[in-house]
Each structure stands twice: as C-alpha cells, then as structure tokens.
Amino acid sequence: MKVCKFGGSSMASAETIRRVAEIIRSDADRRYVVVSAPGKRFSADIKITDSLLTAYHESRKGGSLKELIAPIRERFEGIAHDLGVEDKVDLAALFKEIEAGIAASPIPDFAAAQGERLSAMLLAAFLGCAFIDAKEIIRFADNGQFNAEYTNDVARKRLAAEGSLVVIPGFYGSTSAGQIRTFSRGGSDVTGAIIARAVKADLYENWTDVNGFLTADPRIVDQPKPIPELSYRELRELSYMGANVLHPESIFPVRKANIPINIRNTFEPNNPGTMILPGVLQHDRLITGIAGKKGFVSILIEKSMMNNEIGFTRKLLSVLENLNMSFEHLPSGIDTMTLIIADTEIGGKLQELVGGIREAVSPDRLEIQSDLALIATVGHGMAYKPGTASRLFTALSRVGVNIKMIDQGSSELNIIVAVAGEDYEKAINAIYEEFIN
Ligand code: ASP
C-alpha cells in the first residue's frame, strides 16, 4: 500500500488536479493521499498559501479581510466549477468560516492552513472518497512542537478505520485545545511522511514537478544527471544543503519505519524519478550529488593557548545560545577556532554577537569574513575510495578557487568546503566535471 503526496504545482488548477486523480486511480495501492495547497500555475503566479498569509498580515494592519480573501475564494470557486464539484463542497459557507477564523486568530497558522484544507476537500469530492481533516490526526504541543508519537498513535487508529481511499490535507495539524498549527513552509512533505509511517506504507510517493533529485542544481550546472537512487542519509545531507526537492524533515518519520520514498513527476508520470532507500547503497558510485548554499559568515577567533583553556568552546557557544543562534560548522586549530554561521541566523545581530564573543573569551584576534558559500559533495562511495578529497581540492585549484574551510564529516559521507560567494557557481561546476560528468 502506498501513501502519495501531491505538491502545489500538481494541485494548482482543475487541469492538474485531473492528472492527479488519474495517477491515483491508475494504481489501487495508492490509498492515502496528502495534498498541498494550490501552488503556482505559471512563474509569476502567487501560491495560495502566500495569499492567505498576506491576507492575515494585511488585515492586521487594517486591510479589509473580505477584500483580501476574495481572490483566494475566486480561485477555489474556479477550480470547483471546472472539476464539476461545486455542489459537493459548500465554498460559500467555508469562506465565511475562514474569514471569521482568520479574524479571530492570534497567529498566522490558521490562515496558512486553509489552502491545504480546501484543496483536499475538492480532490476528495472529485474522487468521491473520504476526507479526513489533518487537525484530527496531526498533533502539536501548545508551544508549536510537533508531537510525533501521539500523532502516530492517533493517525494509525483513525486511518485504519477508513475505507479504500482517503484524502488528507498536508502542512498542518492542531493542538489538544484545537488551535491550528503548521509545519515550516513546504511542510506537506512532512505530513506525507507521517501518514506513511502511521499506516506502515510500503512506499511513500512524493509527486512534484521535477523528475526527482539531480546531481547538481540545474540553474548552475547545464543539464545535470538525475540521481536514480539515494540513501536516507545522502538525502538528508543534500536537502539540508539546499537541494530543495523535499522538505528536509520528511526523512524522520519514514526512517523510523524503513519506508522508501519515491520522488515522482506528476507531469511525466512514466519517469521513475528518484528512489530514496534506507541503509548504505552498494554502488560503485563515488559521489551521489553536490549541493550548496550561499550566505554565510565566518568568524575567526584566535587566542594563544586556546587548546589549554578548559571550557573555551562552551563559553564561546554560550554566546550563541544566549542569542538563540545556531551555527553550521566549527573547525578548529591549536590557537584558532572558526564559527561559520548563516546570515539568516545572524539577522541584524552581528555586532551583538561579536561583542559577546569578545567579552566571553577575550580573543587576541577576531576576524570576520562575509559572503561565503558552503558546498557539500555527498556520497557514501567516498568512504571506500582513497583520494576523493585530493581530487576535489585539485579540481577547485585548477579553476583558481580558494578554499576557505574544509570539513569532512567523520561518517565520510560528505566533504564540505567554504568558498567565496563569487566562486560558488565556478566551484560547483568544477566538482561536477571532476566526479559526475
Ligand atoms: N502550502 C505550503 C507552502 O506553500 C505547504 C506545502 O506546500 O507543502 O509552503
């Protein structure tokens, strides 16, 4: 039995929803369906979730909620009409309830969730099957933390009692008091994984608008090769480092139950896509893929006899903890340590951070370098093959890229390098040419 999740572009219009229905009907094993809100129909289009969030925030600044949600309602009415389900889903009543709900909500989550809710209702009506509201089975704690074990228990029981086909909205759930909470953006992938675990699916199919994972970002490398198979851990590394086909947190529920994930393309349903499997894949493949992100800062901290100073790292990291900031890497030498932190974590607090570090550890020297990029070269194969790092560094030196930091995880699953932001594209192409092309 399979759980299928369809993303925003698959749910964007009546036409794409018909394709979704065809995919579901073509395989009787596809029994649990999780959907996103309607996404973009063309590149300048606006995702329903974004329109809902704008409606929430603008109404808080005094905008008319009725006017703000009118285009959202029109879009859903258009889809319902084109699918011929306008008599089965009472959108007028639902939008009355949504308007009141958004007006009464102290947080944006209720508003954000409505796209998924309506999209699931329309698909269920079109398929003539059951709809289960995610608020009944996906549980969050009052502080917004997802409660995995409680959810698994409730969802398992509730879904086992259901008939042959069920549609469930992705992205949200509720607290025990009934308040709607969402995952982070793109979180319908996570819902799909949670449902797959709860029903002990044989496969979690994630239907999107690309043919699975590629070995590099197609905006940087010309026609990168696809990745037919990937391990959970390789997936985690690549998606954390920016290969954004799947929400990085989707891996956790399915990993607990050893369920493979198959990334598929709604618009090319015959393409096998990428299969993501537990364990270490036995391949002669050295490198599985390359991913990276721009927008990092490094802070070099130098202090004589740092290595002898007990508690030095704790003092340094407590500065970050107090500022509620996480870091990416912390390579160290005898008298030096370098913090690598994402710009998005630092926000406007660089001065505060630097002041805190000076006060906490009194460095002899502190040097800041901004506009760095991190590049992860990922693959289980490198653990068995001496010389991988040397080939990587040679490839970068051939194109004149200076490496600012190197971090090879102890699992030998990846080698991460930091380079200047302006060298990012050049570096990725050089690594791709060396290992993949
Ligand atoms: N609709 C939500 C978003 O745009 C969640 C999702 O599509 O997975 O982020």
Image (cartoon, helix red, strand yellow):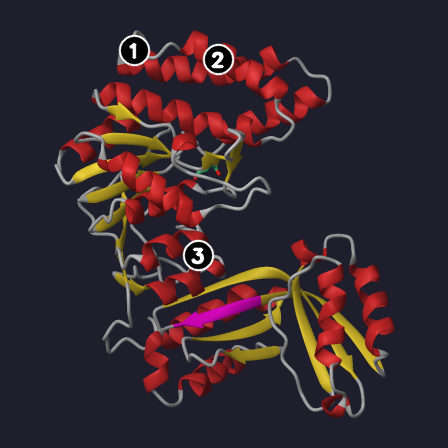
Q: Earlier in the sequence, mark 2 or mark 1?
A: 1
The residue that mark 2 highlights is 95
**Residue 160, position in %: x, y?**
23, 37
Q: Amino acid at mark 3?
A: Ala
Please tell me in which quadrant of the rendered image residue 231 appears.
Answer: bottom left
Does 341 sit left or right of 14 as displayed? Answer: right
Q: Find numbered disc 2 in the image and state the secondary structure of the residue it sits on.
A: helix
**Residue 53, position in %: x, y?**
58, 29
Please tell me in which quadrant of the rendered image residue 283 appears.
Answer: bottom left
Dominant SS of magenta comes to strand
| Residue density around tag 2, few if under 14, some if 14–19, many if 20 or more, within 10 Å | some
**What is the distance, in whole Å, between disc 2 and disc 1 at their CAs?**
15 Å
The residue that mark 3 highlights is 243
Q: Residue at x 52, y 64 (%)?
A: 425
Q: Find numbered disc 3 in the image and state the secondary structure of the residue it sits on.
A: loop
Of the two numbered discs 2 and 3 in the rendering, the one whose residue sits closer to the viewer? 2
Q: Earlier in the sequence, mark 2 or mark 3?
A: 2
Q: Amino acid at mark 2?
A: Phe
Please tell me in which quadrant of the rendered image residue 170 appears.
Answer: top left
Seen in the picture, residue 237 relative to 246 is either above or below; the reply is below
The residue that mark 1 highlights is 88
